[in-house]
Amino acid sequence: MKSLQLDADGRLRHLLAIDGLTRDSLIQLLDQAEALRAQAARGNRKLPLLRGKTVANLFFEDSTRTRVTFQLAAERLSADVVNLDVARSSTNKGESLLDTLATLEAMHCDLFVVRHPQSGAAHFIAQHAPPSVAVLNAGDGRNAHPTQALLDMFSIRQRCGDDFSRLCIAIVGDITHSRVARSDIHALALLGVGELRAIGPRTLVPSQLASQGVVIHEDMDRGLRGVDAVIMLRLQRERMNGAFLPSEREYFQRYGLTTERLRLAKPDCAVLHPGPINRGVEIESAVADGPQSLILDQVSNGLAVRMAVMAQILGNRAQERQR
Ligand code: NCD
């Protein structure tokens, strides 16, 4: 993974996973996102960093936030953007993934932003793409979702400060099927988080996490005590192929984040959720819309973070070509 993602000098060529990045490169991306934040909020003055570049958004799976913020991020940097509507593309006529990509390469696309239901898809595409094309993973199966982890770290840092060693953070719910959780765990480890907890029923929390230093809690009330930030997850039923849960009602009773439960955490505990949220299943509306919720900040921060990633990857490539 490492050699594919980074060039010989350790600079980012593709972004496929947080795993394999260094702490410095992660912090550099967060700092660059910070610098671009004001620009991200403004649509009327575009930065020229990606002028003349073409970004192809290839979403083989549903998405609202990720797809739209990638599109806006590319446009804020003056790129041309094509959104492949997979439901209406030749994929439906039986065209293979590699043939679709070769077709887009022939149109001189510089960057593929890929979301795919298959774990490892972004890595596979990066392996087969010509050297002129960069690949950005926008979520592959249950494997990785690196830009979500970056925006989660950005949002936590904005709210809680940059010393992660002082923080206790909990990830709650369907960790087994979550690429967000996997990427967040790598990012939090790189940033040296003080304590990381995984809370959920045994069927949805991989026991191997304990060997990565994660403290597992089956009891939500106990797991929330003293937490500075809590990352809630959706039940990803599209990836479940068995009976993982008794019922949504029972799940909410045991693991739903309510105002009452949130009082067990630190008084100003930040509440994160990658979205889409299922109100009344993993989170109560009063919490999702309440003062401790960062859910919409996460969306806004996603724009700045995605601008930073694209600017850095295509900037590195321009430097590579000049040498
Ligand atoms: C997540 C995803 O697609 O992995 N959503 C997102 O990108 N904002 C989480 C989810 O689908 O539950």
Image (cartoon, rainbow, N blue to C red):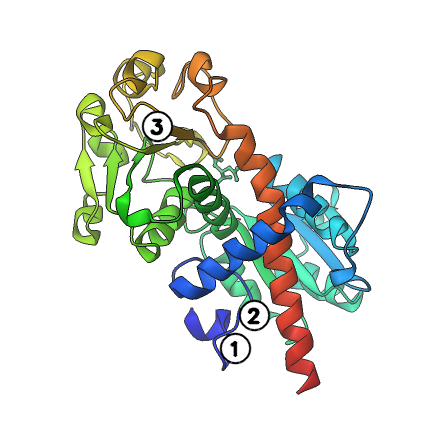
Name the element at disc 2. loop
The reply to whether dot 2 and dot 1 touch (C-beta < 8 Å) is: yes
Q: Is residue 48 left or right of residue 10?
A: right
Name the element at disc 3. loop
Q: Quadrant of residue 159?
A: top left
Classify 260 as above or below 117. above
Per the rendering, the mark at residue 13 is 2
Is the C-beta of the residue carrying label 3 under 8 Å from the nearest atom of ligand 1? no
The reply to whether dot 3 and dot 2 touch (C-beta < 8 Å) is: no
Q: Which residue is mark 3?
A: 269
Q: Is residue 184 left or right of residue 88?
A: left
Which tag is nearer the camera, tag 1 or tag 3?
Answer: 3
**10 Å crowding of disc 3: few (<14), some (14-19), many (20+):** many
Q: Earlier in the sequence, mark 3 or mark 2?
A: 2
Q: Is residue 271 left or right of residue 135?
A: left
Name the element at disc 1. loop
Q: Which residue is mark 1?
A: 7
| Residue 254 % position (x, y) | 25, 17
Q: Residue furthest bottom?
A: 323
The kind of residue on which mark 1 rests is: Asp
Per the rendering, the mark at residue 315 is none
The kind of residue on which mark 3 rests is: Cys
Query: Rounded to the nearest whole Å, what is the CA distance between mark 3 and mark 2?
Result: 36 Å
**Which quadrant does the C terminus fall into?**
bottom right
Classify 121 as above or below 320. above
| Residue 121 % position (x, y) | 51, 57
The kind of residue on which mark 2 rests is: Arg
